[in-house]
Image (cartoon, grey):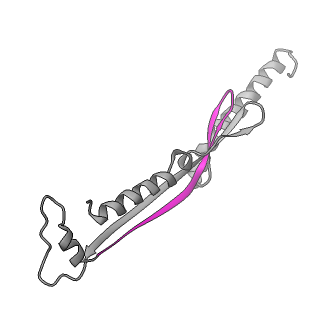
Amino acid sequence: MPHPIENIMETSMEQLKDIADVNTVVGKPITAGDKAVILPISKVTLGFLSGGGEYGQKSGPVKRSGGMMDTAAADAYPFAGTAVAGMSLTPMGFLYVNEDRVRLLSTSYATPIERIMDAVPQALQIVEGMAKKGACKEDGGTDA
């Protein structure tokens, strides 16, 4: 017969497995438009505590043979145990996937520098587009 703390631990771990599946970290895809997909990304933090004890003992620890308690000793000392779990889910951002680019849109920035670093690729694309338009005008081409 397994010790009662083993039953508590097994049940708790099965419940945690159900709570923290892969869809908790990377959410279900959201279709935006014809060819764009948005994936929510989250940070999951789990905490777990389990413990127990045999109460009513006056003379010292109960002797076990092979790691198991004999049934007479099990009835003489009642077991009390518990398991506690806590979970924190923090949204980190969204992964935007289009047919020509992938971007991570953060939900929080620690510093203004991070915000600037995130905007640099988009600014470079705008400058590149403006440069191409300017080159077309200088060559006598049309804006397209």
Task: Please state which of residues 58 and 84 is positioned toward the viewer in this rendering.
Answer: 58
Task: Please state which of residues 112 and 7 is positioned toward the viewer in this rendering.
Answer: 7
The percent position of residue 73, horizontal first and vertical second, equals 18, 73
The percent position of residue 71, horizontal first and vertical second, equals 20, 69
Question: Vertical placement of 13 versus 53: above or below?
Answer: above
> Is 141 part of what is drawn in magenta?
no
Q: Main secondary structure of the magenta part?
A: strand
The percent position of residue 31, horizontal first and vertical second, equals 72, 38
Task: Please state which of residues 6 and 118 is positioned toward the viewer in this rendering.
Answer: 6
The residue segment tinted magenta is: 79-104
Give the quadrant of residue 142: top right
Residue situated furthest front in the rendering = 72
> Is 98 part of what is drawn in magenta?
yes
Question: Vertical placement of 132 versus 52: above or below?
Answer: above
Q: Quadrant of the N terminus?
A: bottom left
Name the residue: 82% across, 15% down. 139
Instruction: Residue 1: tell me if it is visible.
Output: yes
Name the residue: 49% across, 61% down. 87
